[in-house]
Amino acid sequence: MQTRALHAYLRRRNANARHCDVLAAERKDRARIRSERGIRWGERPLKTAA
């Protein structure tokens, strides 16, 4: 049963795969947004003074 579920999942994922250039552009944009906010890996966002 697990094998069938895994194969069905992989078929669905491969059928709906996005182009690698699109994925790279999205990663780059998310990294830019993180850097603007000053968020680093494993840290909490900086709290702004109210």
Image: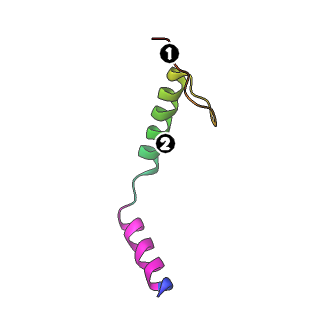
- Chain-order first, disc 2 or disc 1: 2
Q: Residue furthest bottom?
A: 1
At 51% across and 22% down in the image, what residue appears? 37
**Type of secondary structure dominating the magenta stretch:** helix
Could you say where residue 1 lies in the image, as x and y percent from the top left?
A: 46, 88
Q: Kindly identify which residue carries mark 2.
A: 24
Q: Is residue 1 left or right of residue 42?
A: left
The image position of residue 6, as x and y in percent, is: 47, 77
Instruction: Kindly give the residue lying farthest to the front in the view shown.
Output: 50
Residue designated by label 1? 48
In front here: 5 or 26?
Answer: 5
Q: Pick the residue in front: 11 or 20.
A: 11
- Compared to 25, does 49 lie above or below? above
- SS at mark 1 in the image: loop
Query: Magenta segment: does it hold 28?
Result: no
**Residue in view at x 41 percent, y 67 percent:** 14
Q: Amino acid at mark 1?
A: Thr
- Tag nearer the camera, 2 or 1: 1
Q: Residues within 10 Å of mark 1 (few under 14, many from 20)?
A: few
- CA–CA distance between discs 2 and 1? 30 Å
The correct choice, above or below, for 21 with respect to 36 in the image is: below
Q: In the visual, does 31 lie left or right of 42? A: left
Q: Which mark is residue 1?
A: none
Q: Position of residue 8 (x, y in %)?
A: 40, 77
- Residue drawn at (49%, 83%), measured in percent from left and top? 2
What residue do we see at 52% from left, 32% from top?
A: 31
Which quarter of the rendering shows the C terminus? top left
Where is residue 41? Give x, y as percent.
Answer: 63, 35
Q: Amino acid at mark 2?
A: Ala
Q: Is residue 14 left or right of residue 34?
A: left
Check contact, mark 2 vs mark 1: CB within 8 A.
no
Q: Which residues are magenta?
A: 4-16
